[in-house]
Amino acid sequence: MNFTEIKHHEDEFQLATYAKMDIAVERGSGVWVWTSEGDKYLDLYGGHAVCATGHSHPHVVRAIQEQSDKVLFYSNLVYSEIRAKAAEKLVTVAPDVLTKAFFCNSGTEANENAMRIARMATGRKKVLSFDGGFHGRTADSISATFLGKYRDIGKPNVPDHVSAEFGNIESVRAVADRETAAIILEPIQSMAGVREASPAFFSELRQICYDLGIVLIFDEVQTGIGRTGNWFFAGSEHADGAVPDIITLAKSLGSGVPVGACLVNDIVATHIKTNDLGTTFGGGMLAMAAVLATLEAIEDDDMIANSVSIEQHLRDSLVGVAGVKAVLGKGCLIGIEFDEACGAVHKKLLSQKIVTGTSSDPNVLRLLPPLMVSKDEIEMLVEVLRS
């Protein structure tokens, strides 16, 4: 079908979701995608932070193909070699205290389970999250989301959710107490406009949770799996070395195969018994093959070091570019802040066959490219911005 036919069929047979770009992606390779009309686009959005290893990385594709020849799926009612290997690899690259993995299907499901685990571990109900944070669209996750219209979409919200000001530790102290089961936050608030907090905020937050017996959850659905210049934001210099009790993951974890995960420390894990958690599709063999191959590809191709290099190159290249106010974020989670609304810039880039993203801040353009993006490919963006 040509683009007009594809658009007509989707609009006719699907419920509305996002306001879509007027292209239909047919195939991808690395940082590039091709449309139904044969046009080639530079994808600096990565399917919304999903394609960390690039589109159709050969190692990931081969692993999925090989697994599909064996068995596509069986549930957690049986043991699985590929699940065992994926869990071991994921725990190995995580901060040392996070020793157990729970696999599910998406970021919002990971966050739902993380909050449930925190309530089980503490016997408390209250969850504290932050203004500007986005945690998903299912009941508990959207109730923990204090960003624009999203929480209202989820009404009636799950009770016992409260918020504090992101980056303001005193606002946390004013709300957190011994009735609080969990504090959940995105270490970098991507959708809010790539908002950041100081490293000291995270270490002080860690101490508050220790003092009050609160489970600390880092929602690393977007920041994790190498995107911010380390395997995880947790434990890095950006977090002043702070490590939470639970990390939630999705997006980049499977290079495009739907998969989510919670990484949990031993203390929290002791509170979880057989049948407390469950999922039909979570931990399926095909997803586990994708997880293992994704982690291997990032490691083997030295993509994390590349993301650090790309960030610095972009910062250097945008110095003095008219209209650019600041470069925000870390690694390959970057916000370019303009001195006015950037909707026109986003459209102009798309007309030049460069895919980028917007945010809830009208002045911030988001870049979430594959971690293997090259400096030459970034220069294509910079040249358009310079012009």
Image (spheres, rainbow, N blue to C red):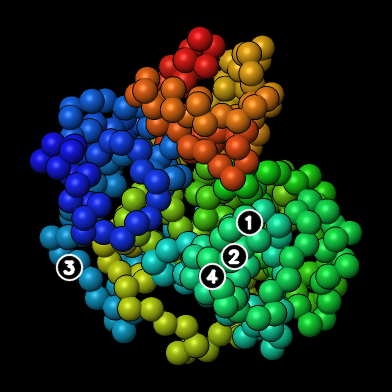
Q: Is residue 214 visible?
A: yes
What SS does tag 2 mark? Answer: helix
Q: Tell me which label, 3 or 2, sits earlier in the chain.
A: 3
User: According to the image, label 4 marks what residue?
Assistant: 154
User: According to the image, label 1 marks what residue?
Assistant: 147
**Image height of 119 relative to 134, above or below:** below
User: According to the image, label 3 marks what residue?
Assistant: 71
Task: Return the x and y of residue 46 as percentages of the image width and height.
Answer: 40, 39
Measure the C-alpha gap from mark 1 to mark 2.
7 Å
Q: Nearer the viewer, residue 185 or 348?
A: 348
Q: Amino acid at mark 3?
A: Val
Measure the C-alpha gap from mark 3 to mark 2.
40 Å
Label 1–label 2 contact, CB within 8 A: yes
Measure the C-alpha gap from mark 2 to mark 4.
5 Å
Label 3–label 2 contact, CB within 8 A: no
Q: Tell me which label, 1 or 3, sits earlier in the chain.
A: 3
Q: Tell me which label, 4 or 1, sits earlier in the chain.
A: 1
Count of numbered marks: 4
Q: Amino acid at mark 1?
A: Leu
Q: Nearer the viewer, residue 363 or 187?
A: 363
What SS does tag 1 mark? Answer: loop
**Image height of 234 relative to 127, above or below:** above
Q: Amino acid at mark 2?
A: Arg
Task: Return the x and y of residue 83 as percentages of the image width and height.
Answer: 35, 67
Q: Nearer the viewer, residue 232 or 51?
A: 51
Looking at the rendered image, the quarter that the N terminus falls into is top left
Q: Is residue 100 visible?
A: no
Quadrant location of residue 260? bottom left
